[in-house]
Image: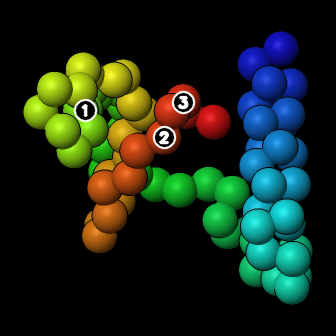
Amino acid sequence: EIVDWFNAIRAARFHYLQVAFPGASDVDLVPKLSRNYLKEGYMEKTGPKQTEGFKKRWFTMDDRRLMYFKDPL
C-alpha cells in the first residue's frame, strides 16, 4: 500500500511538472521528480507585518535555496 501511495504521489508530481514546463521532454522532467533535500519539515513563519500570527508551513532546504509551501505535496 505504501508503494501505491508513493507511485501516486510521483505521478501527480510528474503531471504537475508537465503542466509547469509544457515544452520540456519527459527525459528532462524525470530527474526533478525526486529531490535530495538537506533538511525538510514543518516550521512556523509570520508575514511581513509584526501583527500577523504564525502560520505552519512545510520548508525544504537544498544546497542553495530555502523554500516553503502550505503542505508537503
Q: Residue 27: horizontal and vertical position, in percent?
A: 83, 78
One can see residue 27 in this view = no
Q: For the residue marked with disc 1, what is the amino acid?
A: Lys
Say whether disc 1 or disc 3 marks the residue closer to the N-terminus: 1
Q: CA distance from mark 2 to mark 1?
A: 11 Å
Q: For the residue marked with disc 3, what is the amino acid?
A: Asp
Q: Residues within 10 Å of mark 3 (few under 14, many from 20)?
A: few
Against 18, residue 45 (above or below) is above
Q: For the residue marked with disc 2, what is the amino acid?
A: Phe
Numbered disc in front, either 1 or 3: 1
Left or right: where does residue 32 sit relative to residue 18? left
Residue carrying label 3: 71
Task: Give the residue drawn at x 51%, y 33%.
Answer: 70
Q: Residue 9: horizontal and vertical position, in percent?
A: 77, 36
- Looking at the rendered structure, the secondary structure element under dot 1 is strand
- Looking at the rendered structure, the secondary structure element under dot 2 is strand
The numbered dot on residue 45 is: 1
Against 66, residue 59 (above or below) is above
- The answer to whether the residues at label 2 and label 3 have Cβ atoms under 8 Å apart is yes
Q: CA distance from mark 1 to mark 3?
A: 13 Å
Residue carrying label 2: 69
Q: Quadrant of the C terminus?
A: top right
